Amino acid sequence: MSDTHSILPPSPQLVEESLHTQRNRRLLIVALALSLAGLAYGIYWWTTARHWVQTDNAYVTGNLVPVTAQASGIITQVLFEETQFVNRGDVLVRLDEHEASAALGRARGRLGEAVRHINSLFFTQRQLAEKLAARRARHDVIRHDIDRYRRGVPSGAVSKQILQNALDHLQALEADVRETQAEYDALDARIGGTTVMEHPAVELAKHEFIDAHLEYARQRILAPTSGYVAKRKAQVGDRVKPGTNLMTIVPLDHLWVEANLRETDLVDIRPGQAAEVRVDLYGGKHTFRGTVEGLVPGTGSPFALLPPDNSTGNFIHITERVPVRIALEAEELREHPIRPGLSTVTKIRVNDVGQSVWSSLAKADTEEYQTDVYDHEFISADSLAQEVMKTHLVPGSSSSLLKPSDEAGRRNTFGDGREPVGEKRKAWKTDTTVSNLFE
């Protein structure tokens, strides 16, 4: 009877009380764990998290230097392939030079012809000056004869017919002098105040030659900066024209991070604040140290091809993102190479004071911001043009080598020390007209 009573199952009330006790114990454990987690996060946020702004919408970027054709031609050789490193000034692509060479030859011929033509005008001017001097001399002889004839007419030593013939001859010579003077003035309007080397026609032909030489020189396409070749599009046989994109050069020693932060996180962002960048390429193995260089003055939407027009009233209010530029140290980039386009997780320490939000630490002082590989092209072209001009300049043309100030004095004299043509012509017009000789 007692054995039967000992194996009876527990009452439902006892079972329910046991389950209730276990549930309360578990809820207490869960509540305690959540409280500890909340406390831990609160401590972490107060001591660390509230001093940082973090985003995973951040990417590595840099200067992608395009290499484009500057002249027309057919590609005959491609000297570098993708992933290869090139130095500034290396020849990347060669174009067929035959057309450019022929154009350069034509320009050289036109320049030489222009120099010889203008040089001949200076000799013609000298010839006209001598011709004018000779006609003025004949005019002076007849004028002196007329003076003697007028004194001899009253006494009958000279007939009036002889005097009249002399006056007619003087009138003809006067017309000849005016004609020669007009020819001289017309030529002076073309070459006055300049020299052969500085004449506008020669200058025009010179710069046409320089332009043709630049076209010829740019059949060799040079690397504007040092870096790695990417996105090669140049193919042998392609005919290119100025502006055709051939490849891209990427300098990997100057990269930065573009972190697209929500506008609600920008209030404390300042240039000069420290940043930590974890690139997915290295995971947690390495964290790059960076510095905020500046805030881009606008979100992406205003710079889009079709910017939004919210004034229509048909828009959706969303939180925009503003790019923030973060510089990376060159030493770290050399030790841990990265590439443009890699994803990152970026944190910015906002409790740093930083600088004014209107300032910027970005600088355009690295190699890819300037190039001098094209400077020698113009210098070489100008030097060759000068050689062509000197080759075709006729020896002994002293007037063509004078400066405008010296040329004016030489050009307006007869070469024998007498007064300039213009001054003598004025005196001759007032004192030696045919009508005055009858007085």
Image (spheres, grey):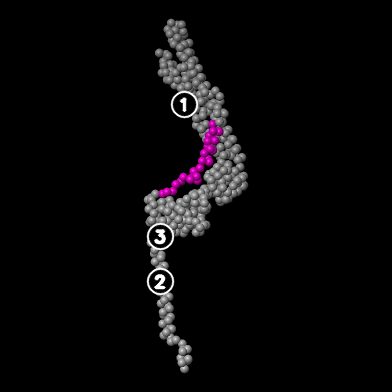
x 46%, y 92%: residue: 2
- Residue 90 screen position, x and y as percent: 57, 43
Q: Residues within 10 Å of mark 3 (few under 14, many from 20)?
A: few
Mark 2 or mark 1, earlier in chain: 2
Q: CA distance from mark 2 to mark 1?
A: 101 Å
Q: CA distance from mark 3 to mark 2?
A: 23 Å
Q: Which residues are magenta?
A: 360-386
Label 1 sits on residue: 404
Tags 1 and 3 in contact by the CB under 8 Å rule?
A: no
User: Which of 195 and 279 lies nearest the eye of the viewer?
Assistant: 279
Residue 391 in sight here: yes
- Residue 100 screen position, x and y as percent: 59, 39
Say the numbered circle drawn on residue 48. 3
Q: Nearer the viewer, mark 2 or mark 1?
A: 2
Q: CA distance from mark 1 to mark 3?
A: 79 Å
Q: Amino acid at mark 2?
A: Leu
Label 2 sits on residue: 32
The number of numbered discs placed on residues in the rendered structure image is: 3
